[in-house]
């Protein structure tokens, strides 16, 4: 009777194989391994056992388990033996200094999204168990966050990990009409506070980059896990860098309250004093949608003066935000001239 071919049965077989090869003091030939590991013993034929054993060896090595082939004795030079050395298999003792553990804790707390917060916290608990707790006073006041507020993040991450194709409605800009896309996710990454998914757009037959904040509605799977494999040489960061223009498309003129929007000030090529506690900044930009999102996020601390395309794009972002929060849409930004709101 053949052994069951299920993920649980395979996991149990691999664990039994690892324990057998760890426990032996000398390399074991295949015939002896077949006698010891029950799942191999029930293989219907020698050929079936050989195929199963070869696959299991490859799986263990792919997992990083150091299975080695050694000569059994000088009398059996034509038959290799197998074993796993304890010294190569065991992890070294961890000796993390308090500040090192504090940095790891900081990295774990960075993930605020539920889909990743659990695994990060679990990894941190395991580190504390072997290395001690972090200094409670270390890095006080530093609390970074990788926010993933886009509803499509979790289903896209799961589809990417499962190699499952998806479909979603996508708009190329704040004013563009949403169109249905069918995508094989190849990678996910964050840049400048925004999340992107790279992959094959099967409707267009070419690789594309999609910003998660431009996805509307639900992300739905259209195929089974393992339906495709990303190219082995795929580099999401290089693909994103090639997709986003590097050369400035223009210069925006933005009024900023004195003492506010320091990140914008670092990007400005010119600063001019204006009336009533405002300053006029000249901001080079390559992507007006990206700039509009940054400006809208600063609320009443900024006012966009020119050009018209940046004014319109920022107004579209603010209008969408007001529509999503109707109870807050009528609130005034307050403050003195040159006026309230984010656009002129």
Image: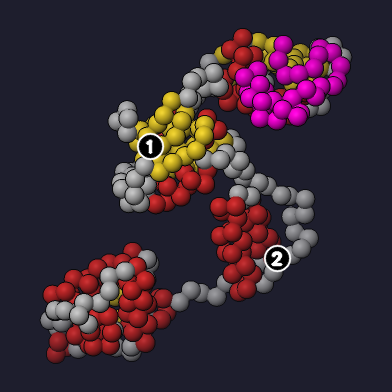
User: Which residue in the structure is indicated by mark 1?
Assistant: 183
Magenta stretch: give its range.
Answer: 315-344
**Predominant SS along the magenta part:** loop
User: Which residue in the structure is indicated by mark 2?
Assistant: 134
Instruction: Quadrant for residue 297, please give it.
Output: top right
Q: In which quarter of the image is the C terminus?
A: top right
For this orientation, the residue located farthest to the front is 327
Q: Is residue 39 above or below residue 59?
A: below
Instruction: Quadrant for residue 105, please give it.
Output: bottom right
SS under mark 1: strand
Q: Which residue is drawn at 37% across and 66% down?
A: 63
Residue 180 left/right relative to 300 = left
Q: In which quarter of the image is the N terminus?
A: bottom left
Q: Nearer the viewer, residue 4 or 207?
A: 4
332 falls in the magenta region: yes
Separation (CA) of disc 1 from disc 2: 43 Å
Spot occupied by residue 170 in the image (x, y as percentages of width and height):
47, 29
How many numbered marks does the figure carry?
2
209 falls in the magenta region: no
Q: Residue at x 72, y 19 (%)?
A: 342
Q: Is residue 138 above or below residue 7?
A: above
SS under mark 2: loop
């Amino acid at each position: 009777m053949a052994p069951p071919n299920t993920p649980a049965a395979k996991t149990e077989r691999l664990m039994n194989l690892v324990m057998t090869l760890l426990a032996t003091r000398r390399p074991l030939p295949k015939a002896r391994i077949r006698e010891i590991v029950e799942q191999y013993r029930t293989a219907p034929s020698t050929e079936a056992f050989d195929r199963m054993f070869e696959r299991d060896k490859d799986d263990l090595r792919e997992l990083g388990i150091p299975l080695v082939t050694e000569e059994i004795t000088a009398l059996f030079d034509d038959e290799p033996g197998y074993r796993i050395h304890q010294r190569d298999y065991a992890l070294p003792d961890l000796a993390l200094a308090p500040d090192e553990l504090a940095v790891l804790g900081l990295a774990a707390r960075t993930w605020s999204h539920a889909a990743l917060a659990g695994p990060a916290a679990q990894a941190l608990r395991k580190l504390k168990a072997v290395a001690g707790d972090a200094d409670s006073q270390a890095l006080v006041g530093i609390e970074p966050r990788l926010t993933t507020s886009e509803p499509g993040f979790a289903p896209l991450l799961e589809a990417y990990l499962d190699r499952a194709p998806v479909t979603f409605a996508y708009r190329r800009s704040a004013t563009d009409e949403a169109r249905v896309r069918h995508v094989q996710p190849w990678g996910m990454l964050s840049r400048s506070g925004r999340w992107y998914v790279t992959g094959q757009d099967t409707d267009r037959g070419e690789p594309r980059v999609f910003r998660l904040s431009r996805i509307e509605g639900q992300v739905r799977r259209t195929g089974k896990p393992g339906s495709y494999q990303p190219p082995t040489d795929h580099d999401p960061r290089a693909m994103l860098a090639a997709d986003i223009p590097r050369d400035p498309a223009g210069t925006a003129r933005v009024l900023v309250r004195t003492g506010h929007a320091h990140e914008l000030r670092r990007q400005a090529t010119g600063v001019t004093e204006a009336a009533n506690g405002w300053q006029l900044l000249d901001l080079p930009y390559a992507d007006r949608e990206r700039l509009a999102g940054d400006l809208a996020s600063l609320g009443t601390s900024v006012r966009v003066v020119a050009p018209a395309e940046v004014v319109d794009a920022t107004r579209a972002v603010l209008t969408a935000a007001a529509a999503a929060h109707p109870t807050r849409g009528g609130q005034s930004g307050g403050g003195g001239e040159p006026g309230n709101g984010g656009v002129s």
